[in-house]
Amino acid sequence: MPALTFKLNPHLYLRDPQHTELGQKIIQVSVDLIDRLGFEQFNFKKLAEEIDSTEASIYRYFENKHRLLLYLVGWYWNWLEYRIDMFTNNLADPKEKLRVCIRVIAEEKQYDSTFEFINEEALYRIVIAELDKTYLTKQVDSDNKEGLFGGFKSLCKKIAGWVTEVNPAYPFPHALISTLLLTSKQQIFFADHLPSLTNIGIETDRYNRLETFLGTLLLNSVQSKS
Amino acid sequence: MPALTFKLNPHLYLRDPQHTELGQKIIQVSVDLIDRLGFEQFNFKKLAEEIDSTEASIYRYFENKHRLLLYLVGWYWNWLEYRIDMFTNNLADPKEKLRVCIRVIAEEKQYDSTFEFINEEALYRIVIAELDKTYLTKQVDSDNKEGLFGGFKSLCKKIAGWVTEVNPAYPFPHALISTLLLTSKQQIFFADHLPSLTNIGIETDRYNRLETFLGTLLLNSVQSKS
DNA sequence: TCAGTTATAATAGTATTACTATCATTTCTG
DNA sequence: CAGAAATGATAGTAATACTATTATAACTGA
C-alpha cells in the first residue's frame, strides 16, 4: 500500500509540516512528547531540544502549541473516519454500518503502518487526555469559523446520517453521535484514573466492554420513538 | 429557610473560605471573573485587584487556581446533589427518581437564594466550560487520592444505585450516569459554539429538548438486557 | 487593657512560559 | 552559480504562577 497522507485544513499550520523533513519531525516527536509530558507541560522549547532544532523554527510551522494540538487531533479524526470508511463501504444496511462503526470507535488503537511518522497508539492516548481542550477555550468560535474542527464535525455528520437512515424519526442524531464519540474517550480515561465513574476496567477485554456499552447506548436510543 | 453551606473536602483549600469575609469574597468574585474571562485568562492577580486585596492573601486560602476551580466545581456537585435529593426524597419508585433526576440535571440553573455569595447561573456556565479541566491533568491520580473529586463520584454513585434498582442486570450503571452528567454539559456547550454537533438549539425550550434527549438515552439503556 | 497571636496588606523578587525580532548560515532551485 | 527560501543562533519581552519578607491591622484571652 502506498504511503498516504491527509489533507488537513491549512489554517491549522503556517507551513505544511507533511512537506518537509523538519515538519515531519515536529509532528512525530510532538506526539511522543505530549504523550509523555501532557499538553500543559509540553512546550516548543522542550520540543526544539528533542529534535535538535530551535523554538523559532517550530514557530514557523505552527502559530502556537494550541494549533499544533488541533492539528494532531484533526489528524486523528481523519484517521478514524478513514478506518470507518474502510470497514463500512462494503455494507448496505445502515444498522450494520453503525455496528461496525462502534467496533472501530471502541477498538484498541494500534500502530498503523499506512501512515509514517505518526504513532497512533500515543496519538490515541493524547486524544483521550487532551481532546476536550481543543474546543474548551475562549477562542472556540473564531477557531470554528476557520474550520479547525472540521474533522470532528465531518465524522459526526456521516455517522448521524446513518442514524437517520435507520430511524428518520429520531430527533437527536448529531447529539447522540457526538456523545458517543466523546464518551468512548472519557470512559477509557475514567477506567484509568477515576474507576468509580465507570464499569469499564483496565483488563485486556476493556475494549470489548466499551463496545458493548456504546452499542446499547446507541442502538437502543436510535430505535426509540420519543 | 436558614442560610446553608456545604462541607467541602478540606484538602481543597488551605483556609476555609466560607468562614471569613475575605474568603467569601474570593469565592463570590472568582465565580464572576472566571465566567467572564475563562479559566485560562483568570489569575489571582486579577482577582486580587477586583476584590481590593493582594495575591499573597488569596494564596493563603487556595494553594493555586486549579484548587480553586476544584472547589467551585465541588460546590456545584454538592448543590446539584442537594437539589436532586430535594426532589426525589418523597419518591419510592426508582424509575420515577431517575426521571426527576434527569429533569433536575437538564433544567436551566437559576440563582438559588438558599446559598449566599454564590451566583449559580454563572457557576453553571463555568461548569459547562471548565469541568473537564478539573480532571484532565497530569496530577489527576494524586488529586483523586486526596478525594478532590468526591462530589462528582458521590452523585454518580447515588444515581447509579437507582439504575441498579430498576434493572439489576444492567452492567454499566456508573458508566451510564457519568456519561449522562457530562453529556448534559457538553451538549449545551455544543449548542452555543459547535451547533452541528448537536440537535439542541439556543431557543428557550433547549432545556426541555436536553431533558428529552437525556431521558431516551438513560431509560432505553437501563431497560436493555445486554 | 494590653500582650500576644493571627490575618491581611504592601512590596519585591524568581523561574518559566509563550512568544517576537534580528541576523547569520545553510540548503535548495532555476 | 546567483538568488531565494529555510533554518539556526541568539536575544529579548511581557505575562504568569508563584514565594518571601516585613509591616500593619484586628481580634482574643488573662
Image: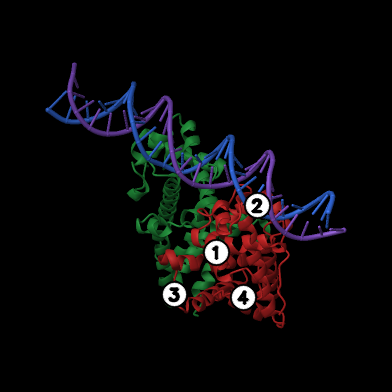
Chain colours: A red, B green, C purple, D blue
- Quadrant for the N terminus of chain A, please: bottom right
- The disc numbered 3 marks a residue on which chain? B
Mark nearer the N terminus (4 vs 1): 1
Between residue D17 and residue B111, name the one nearer to us.
Answer: D17
Badges 3 and 4, same chain: no
Q: Which mark is residue A153?
A: none
Q: In whole angstroms, how far apart are the C-alphas of marks 2 and 3?
A: 59 Å
**Left or right of B224, for residue A75:** right
SS label for mark 4 = loop
SS label for mark 1 = helix
Q: In whole angstroms, how far apart are the C-alphas of marks 3 and 1?
A: 43 Å
Q: Is residue B167 visible?
A: yes
- The disc numbered 1 marks a residue on which chain? A
Q: In whole angstroms, how far apart are the C-alphas of marks 3 and 4?
A: 41 Å
Residue at left offset 56%, top offset 68%: A124
Which circle, 3 or 1, is nearer the viewer? 1
Q: Is residue B90 visible?
A: no
Q: Position of residue B2 (x, y in %)?
A: 35, 41
SS label for mark 2 = helix
**B31 is higher (above) or lower (below) than B195:** above
Q: Which residue is mark 1?
A: A32
Between residue A218 and residue B112, name the one nearer to us.
Answer: A218
Q: Residues within 10 Å of mark 4 (few under 14, many from 20)?
A: few
- Quadrant for the C terminus of chain A, please: bottom right
Q: Residues within 10 Å of mark 3 (few under 14, many from 20)?
A: some
Please, what is the three-letter code of the amino acid marked with disc 1?
Answer: Asp
**Left or right of C29, for residue B96:** left
Between residue B8 and residue C15, name the one nearer to us.
Answer: C15
Q: Which mark is residue A57?
A: 2
